[in-house]
Image: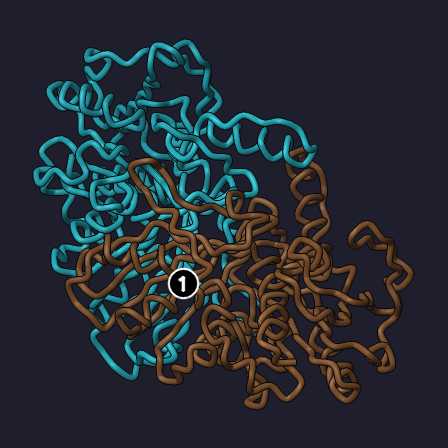
Chain colours: A brown, B cyan
């Protein structure tokens, strides 16, 4: 980032998978941090984390922790956000919340900067960071809607284990090793830590992310459906989703099918629209076997789009394969991007 | 199987992933084998394989190998089928071919017994076994079409590595171990052995199965599209597919979206139709976290269906999650099923 007014930043959930990426991204982007405060639950307080060569001690998050904080990046779980976000706001901080606590609150803007940056201005102290799987999809949908008009979205996801936290990645690795060695293994975390049953993720696929709702959809699927409509300001857009957890650590992939409001669009025109989209990298050359994969997208900030092709029977239907690092664009980077826009536009 | 006229059976590709499952399934089903001949390429000839307590030596497949064979189960690759199937037919054998060599040949029936058993009678010496990912999908589509009429199918697959052979599974396991240990690994087989580039499958997802066609679809996707129409005798059915290889050894999973020719069908009625479908097991109870996974379906013959739910915006649209062992129903078991129907119905 270019030279800006410096701000006091707090990261809540600093020792978690996303919190760590937030701290790395603040450093990597040279975000204009005046003072940095790293916060966590009492369990992780006392941990040491380095930022720009200096060692910071993680402190237990309390309401008073947010005194003198300008921007507070929250990623410590929904119940903690519910408890502490109002306290931070009361003390004058702008909260950028990476949990599902406030995403569907009509008073809280839900923001992917490439899609609805202007919504940031509507905030009353809290800006919600969307769900990881939603962010990368709407980033790809935005230029399509701008150019052709979106009529319908159907998505099947291929989601990384780090979306369920560092513990889930550890469990996947331990299960993998045990299965390769023909040994016993434990299964305590996925699909949902607090749910009744647990199934192995190693060498498997789990068609459940988050808890089930009454209608048979999971909460993750509901997030994709509802958040997409909110971010894109398209309440009536038909969106449906199937969300699946797969045995890889980083990057979500998505098989996205769209119907557009225009006929006779060529694949090469569609590709051009994607390649000009903000925050998108077109990676789509079948003859060179060029397409994104979870491993190829890991550690990168962009949303990668490949496998673009037209439905053989439906002239206005297109497939794409959308891949992005779920901890970066899906979480930490999107939050920092929001913070950058706030600072750059003097919206604080 | 009940007591039948005994027949001479040959298995070509006896040492491969599918060939091994064919031999196991013949034994498991107590198929009325008079004499069994195990055949392979010269490279694998000489291997020993046991069947019903007796040890068999695998012989190199030659045209003369098929003398006195009643049913020849082929699973040694398309080019070998092209070369040897006519030789087997010339010598009076009925070939059940598990390669893509003859699947779209208008003279060759393409059969999933639960869907189009009667097509077996049209054979002129060769019956084709469909592609693994197609078989389990059409098994699930059949009762839906019978009851409601199918209008459209969209599928995103989650396919097991064993579909690319035993070598690919070995490579996945070696890559997994190396990645867990932070060591170097080799990448020589997937996505397509004979293709230019290779990518790691361990802790990754590869949106390429088989080679790319001119229009950007892979051959695997084309197989799902074209074979579905042929098996179901629905040339005009809109079908589109995205096929993805995932890091697990056995069972393909599929996120299948269908539009039916009837409105106001309830999820519970739809479930009833699936639970009554031949060869299908309904495994769908969200409140109990009950749904099929690749690990839960491995080693079983049925096609498992769960996660049935209605599109929130499209009253005639339904999702399902279809999982089956790709080496059994997707290959060996479907071939043996065809052979059983041939014998039971005296269609030899």
For this rendering, which residue is in front, B225 or B212?
A: B212
Q: Which image quadrant is residue A55 in?
A: bottom right
On the picture, is A120 further left or further right than A303?
right
Q: Vertical placement of B112 versus B128: above or below?
A: below
On the picture, is A6 further left or further right than B123?
right
Image location of residue A90, percent across then percent down = 77, 89
Image location of residue B37, percent across then percent down = 32, 18
Q: Which image quadrant is residue A121 in?
A: bottom right
Residue A188 in view? no
On the picture, is B98 further left or further right than B108?
right
Q: Vertical placement of B61 versus A69: above or below?
A: above
Residue A267 in view? yes
Q: Secondary structure at mark 1?
A: helix
Q: Chain of mark 1?
A: A
Circle 1 Cα neighbour tier, 10 Å, few/some/many (<14 / 14–19 / ≥20): many
**Disc 1: which residue:** A140
For this rendering, which residue is in front, B81 or B64?
A: B81
| Residue at position x 14%, y 46% in the image | B119
On the picture, is A137 further left or further right than B211?
right
Q: How many marks?
A: 1
């Amino acid at each position: 980032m270019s030279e800006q007014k410096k701000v006091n930043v707090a990261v809540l959930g600093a020792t978690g998978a996303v919190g760590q990426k937030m701290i790395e991204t603040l450093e990597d982007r040279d975000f204009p941090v005046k003072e940095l405060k790293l916060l966590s639950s009492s369990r992780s307080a006392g941990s040491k984390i380095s930022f720009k060569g200096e060692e910071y001690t993680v402190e237990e998050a309390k309401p008073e922790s947010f005194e003198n904080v300008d921007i507070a990046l929250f990623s410590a779980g929904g119940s903690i956000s519910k408890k502490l976000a109002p306290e931070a706001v009361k003390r004058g901080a702008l909260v950028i919340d990476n949990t599902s606590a406030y995403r569907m609150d009509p008073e809280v803007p839900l923001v992917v900067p490439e899609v609805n940056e202007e919504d940031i201005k509507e905030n009353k102290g809290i800006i919600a960071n969307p769900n990881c799987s939603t962010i990368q999809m709407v980033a790809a949908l935005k230029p399509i809607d701008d150019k052709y008009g979106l009529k319908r979205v159907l998505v099947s996801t291929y989601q990384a284990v780090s979306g369920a936290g560092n513990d889930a990645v550890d469990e996947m690795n331990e299960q993998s090793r045990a299965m390769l060695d023909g040994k016993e293994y434990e299964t305590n975390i996925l699909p949902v830590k607090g749910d009744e049953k647990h199934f192995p993720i190693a060498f498997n696929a789990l068609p459940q992310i988050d808890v089930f709702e009454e209608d048979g959809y999971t909460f993750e699927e509901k997030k994709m459906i509802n958040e997409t409509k909110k971010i894109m300001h398209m309440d009536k857009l038909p969106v449906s989703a199937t969300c699946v957890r797969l045995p890889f650590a980083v990057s979500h992939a998505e098989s996205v099918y769209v119907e557009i409001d225009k006929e006779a669009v060529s694949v090469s025109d569609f590709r051009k629209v994607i390649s000009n989209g903000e925050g998108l990298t077109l990676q789509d050359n079948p003859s060179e076997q060029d397409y994104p994969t979870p491993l190829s997208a890991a550690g990168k900030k962009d949303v990668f789009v490949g496998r673009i092709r037209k439905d053989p029977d439906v002239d206005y239907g297109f497939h794409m394969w959308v891949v992005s690092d779920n901890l970066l664009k899906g979480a930490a980077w999107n939050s920092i991007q929001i913070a950058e826009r706030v600072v750059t536009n003097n919206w604080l």
